[in-house]
Amino acid sequence: MRYISLLENCRNQPTLDTLIRISSALGEPLSQIILEAEEEVQI
């Protein structure tokens, strides 16, 4: 769980493989997660 905490607090950069695994576990396409994150940053 420490690794997830580091990601949440922007103290670590996930690899593409990690991003794919997280999106799979969430049941969301990675492209959708990235799109939502980009929209959140622009607000």
Image (cartoon, rainbow, N blue to C red):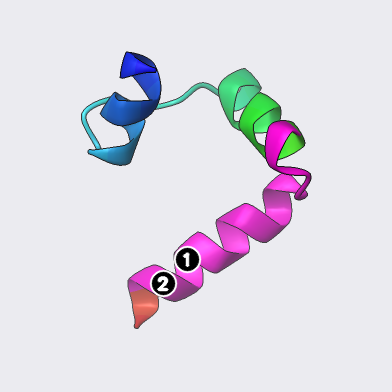
The residue beneath circle 1 is: 38
Q: Position of residue 33 (x, y in %)?
A: 62, 55
Element assignment for label 2: helix
Q: Residue furthest front?
A: 1
Q: On screen, 8 above or below 14?
A: below
Q: In the rendered structure, are the residues bearing label 1 and label 2 in contact, judged by CB atoms less than 8 Å apart? A: yes
Q: What's the magenta region?
A: 25-41
Q: Position of residue 19 (x, y in %)?
A: 59, 31
Residue 43, picture quadrant: bottom left
Residue closer to the observer: 25 or 38: 25
Residue type of the residue flagged with mark 1 = Glu
Residue 35, picture quadrant: bottom right
Count of numbered tags: 2
Seen at 45% across and 25% down, the residue is 14
Q: Position of residue 26 (x, y in %)?
A: 69, 42
From mark 1 to mark 2, how far is it between C-alphas? Answer: 5 Å
